[in-house]
Image (cartoon, rainbow, N blue to C red):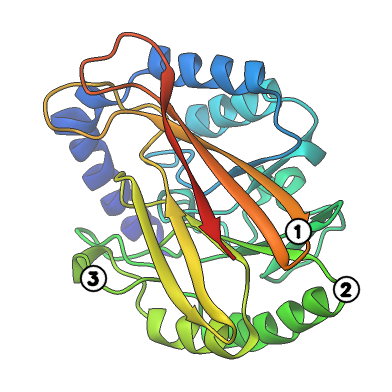
Amino acid sequence: MTPAYALTKRLFSWSSWRRKRSKHHKREILDAITTDIAAYGPDHLVITGDLINFAADKEFAAARAWLQSLGDARDVTVTPGNHDALAGCGTFDPWAEWLEDELTETFPKVRVRGEVAVICVNTGLPTAPFLATGTCGEDQLARLGPILDDLKGRGLFRVIAIHHPPTPGGSPRKALTDQKALREVLGVHGAELILHGHTHVPLLGAVKGPDGPIPAVCAPSASQRPVGKTNAARWHGIEIEKAADGWSVRVEIRGFAPDGVAVEGLGQYRLDV
């Protein structure tokens, strides 16, 4: 990425922040969500990207401080988003300790916790102004299949953590450019669950897998204040247990109601995996 390109992209991101996002994303909302998560006491946190807006040094420092406030880095996994790629940091060094346990230079990255494996697929790449697309790339997709097969052979529950949604639909300006190729890999090698971000909208979709649909779950931004028709901040508490016929997965939704003033329970559902 050239300095001129980086400056242009950052200016567009800064302009978007000043015009719109700064009015909707508030630190006090993020702090309330963070406090609620801590009270829930999850075994592991998965954050699906866009920790920063326009790659300023102060943003990286603030994001790292927030990640550190969540607890031991071994209990928190981050996968990069398109805003995290604005600095052209292909290895995403600022988030290294939250990406994997043994540092490597390539994605996907894998963390195994008990019977659950989190596979971080990187879609965050620098893009032209006005674009927020993502791309897995042929090399990463070629590595993903064997990784999924190995984890399945070990009897693990496989969670794909990815920023851009792998499901069809949405604006081409913000889409995963090789989503079809990713779905083909998942259709052959499978996974039990997909967690994604990017849309700022609560979504429950699915991708075709070799043994049935693979659920794809998205929560809105964790800092979005409840105002108007926007999707207020939420987080998902996901309980995964081994069952006689596979896995039992329960999703608890917590966050701000549209007119809410505090984090509350917003419902729950089970996933068929």
Query: Is 239 placed above or below 106 here?
Result: above
**Amino acid, disc 2:** Arg
Mark 1, residue position: 243
Mark 3, residue position: 169
The quadrant where residue 16 appears: top left
Which residue is pictured at 17% across the width and 21% down the height? Answer: 227
Mark 2, residue position: 154
Query: Residue 184, percent across and down?
Result: 49, 89
Q: Are marks 3 and 1 in contact (CB under 8 Å)?
A: no
Distance between the alpha carbons at the discs numbered 3 and 2: 34 Å
| Residue 165 visible from this viewpoint | no
How many numbered badges does the structure rendering display? 3
Quadrant including the C terminus:
bottom right
Which residue is pictured at 72% across the width and 39% down the height? Answer: 44
Quadrant including the N terminus:
bottom left
Mark 2 closeness class: few <14, some 14–19, many ≥20 residues within 10 Å: few
Query: Is 38 placed above or below 18 here?
Result: above
Residue mark closest to the camera, 2 vs 1 = 1
Residue nearest the observer in this picture, 90 or 159: 159
Q: Earlier in the sequence, mark 3 or mark 1?
A: 3
Q: Earlier in the sequence, mark 3 or mark 2?
A: 2
Pick out the residue farthest to the top. 261
* 51 with respect to 150 (left or right): left
Which residue is pictured at 67% across the width and 50% down the height? Answer: 93
Pick out the residue farthest to the front. 244
Distance between the alpha carbons at the discs numbered 3 and 1: 33 Å
**Amino acid, disc 1:** Ala
**Amino acid, disc 3:** Gly
Mark 1 closeness class: few <14, some 14–19, many ≥20 residues within 10 Å: few
Mark 3 closeness class: few <14, some 14–19, many ≥20 residues within 10 Å: few
Distance between the alpha carbons at the discs numbered 2 and 1: 16 Å
